[in-house]
Image (cartoon, helix red, strand yellow):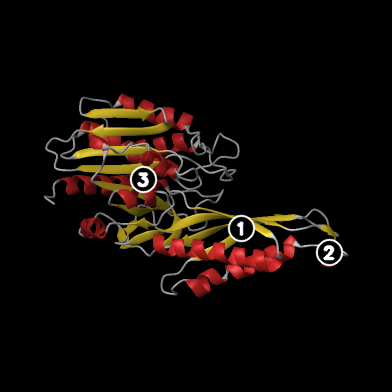
């Protein structure tokens, strides 16, 4: 029986960190995970892959005396970021990096599979290695494909997200909404271009796009309860090609975020209304696309979250603190809209660099305490009567 040590976890994490892949392209990652899982397979385990979502892996453990089915989810994709850490185990794939820490998420889930292959759980347990969290709505795709039907449906779903701003190994969550729901905003302003010396003959999409961007700032300040909050940020704009020509079109993109699904719906409606008004006032066409996909608010089930918090806070060997809500987006939110559960932060101690930074360098001393706390919670939860 092989022991799960910090060194073992470190090796899993470094192996995975070297091979980051984008959403729905995680084939090398999938093969690494599947080979590990198969090496631990026994009669209590069922391993499932799905042709319609070929990089996904599900593992089901049959419980010794089951009264429920618990689920644990880890996302497996990476970001289109060029790594700049100079680590000896840095990404081997140009322009790809686990800059959001999904290598950490997979490592803990692998350790869960290894542990429960050696210690049959009391309840049924499902481990889900999910592709396409960063893009392409992998959680929603999996759910819509029916991956969680019948014996594969958890009664409760759990997952973690690493947090560089927390000390290594510290866990943190709250009862209620942990992360915001998000929508991706894309806008195309179609004007009439021409010589910049004759603007009265044209319909300047640069001025109109500027007007619209400024107007969108009122969505949060005047359409959202100040106690609730929200975000409308434009991060990309493209239009024009020289100083003395007004272009025909301007394109810009941004993100919209709210702590509630209802709030996100209100903001999306107001954005469309404002864009329609600016288009009418300027006699142009403005195309607006708002895609929320699976990035709904991560709403922790209050009963389950309080249960978890009670466990964490009564253990002297677990570092835990209550979390504040964050505007981070996570597609685990979609699954939590369908199945009650909880997401937690796991501290990885890089206060210099944020998630998605090309310099992100997590503190690997977080791996063993993070795994141990989560594994102990799952076993404790399985011995509760309700």
Residue 235: mark? 1
> How crowded is the residue under tag 3: few (<14 C-alpha within 10 Å), some, or many (20+)?
many
The residue singled out by tag 3 in the image is 367
The residue singled out by tag 2 in the image is 201
Task: Answer above or below: position of 99 versus 63.
Answer: below
Label 1's element?
Answer: strand
Label 3's element?
Answer: helix
Image point (35%, 61%), residue name: 177
- The answer to whether residue 260 is seen in the rendering is no
The mark lying in front, picked from 2 and 1, is: 2
Image point (39%, 31%), residue name: 33
Label 2's element?
Answer: helix
Position in image of residue 175 (x %, y %): 29, 61
Disc on the earlier residue, 1 or 3: 1
Residue 71: mark? none
Disc on the earlier residue, 2 or 1: 2
Task: Answer above or below: position of 51 versus 220.
Answer: above
Q: Are marks 1 and 3 in contact (CB under 8 Å)?
A: no
């Amino acid at each position: 029986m092989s022991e799960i040590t910090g060194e073992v976890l470190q090796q899993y994490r470094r192996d995975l960190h070297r091979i980051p892949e984008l959403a729905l392209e995680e084939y090398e990652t999938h093969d690494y995970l599947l080979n590990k899982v198969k090496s631990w397979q026994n009669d209590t385990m069922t391993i499932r892959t799905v042709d319609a979502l070929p990089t996904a892996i599900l593992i089901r453990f049959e419980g010794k005396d089951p009264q429920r089915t618990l689920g644990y989810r880890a996302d497996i994709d990476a970001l289109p970021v060029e790594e700049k850490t100079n680590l000896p185990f840095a990404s081997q794939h140009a322009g790809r990096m686990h800059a959001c820490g999904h290598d950490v998420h997979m490592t803990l889930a692998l350790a869960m599979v290894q542990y429960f292959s050696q210690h049959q759980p009391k309840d049924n347990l499902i481990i889900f290695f999910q592709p396409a969290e960063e893009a392409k709505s992998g959680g929603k795709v999996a759910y819509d494909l029916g991956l969680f039907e019948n014996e594969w449906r958890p009664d409760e779903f759990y997952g973690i997200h690493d947090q560089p701003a927390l000390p290594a190994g510290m866990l943190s969550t709250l009862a209620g909404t942990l992360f915001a729901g998000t929508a991706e905003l894309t806008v195309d302003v179609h004007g009439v271009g021409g010589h910049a010396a004759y603007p009265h003959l044209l319909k300047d999409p640069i001025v109109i796009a500027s007007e619209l961007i400024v107007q969108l700032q009122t969505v949060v300040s005047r359409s959202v309860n100040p106690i609730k909050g929200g975000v409308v940020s434009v991060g990309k704009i493209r239009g024009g090609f020289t100083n003395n020509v007004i272009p025909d079109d301007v394109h810009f993109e941004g993100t919209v975020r709210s702590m509630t699904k209802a709030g996100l719906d209100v903001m999306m409606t107001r954005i469309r209304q404002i864009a329609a008004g600016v288009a009418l006032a300027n006699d142009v066409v403005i195309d607006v696309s708002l895609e929320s996909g699976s990035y709904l608010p991560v709403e922790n089930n209050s009963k389950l979250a309080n249960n978890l918090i009670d466990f964490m806070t009564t253990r002297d060997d677990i570092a835990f603190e209550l979390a504040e809500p964050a505007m981070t987006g996570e597609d685990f939110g979609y699954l939590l809209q369908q199945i009650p559960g909880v997401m937690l932060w796991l501290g990885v101690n890089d206060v210099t660099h944020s998630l998605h930074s090309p310099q992100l360098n997590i503190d690997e001393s977080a791996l063993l305490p993070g795994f141990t706390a989560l594994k102990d919670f799952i076993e404790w939860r399985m011995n509760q009567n309700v």
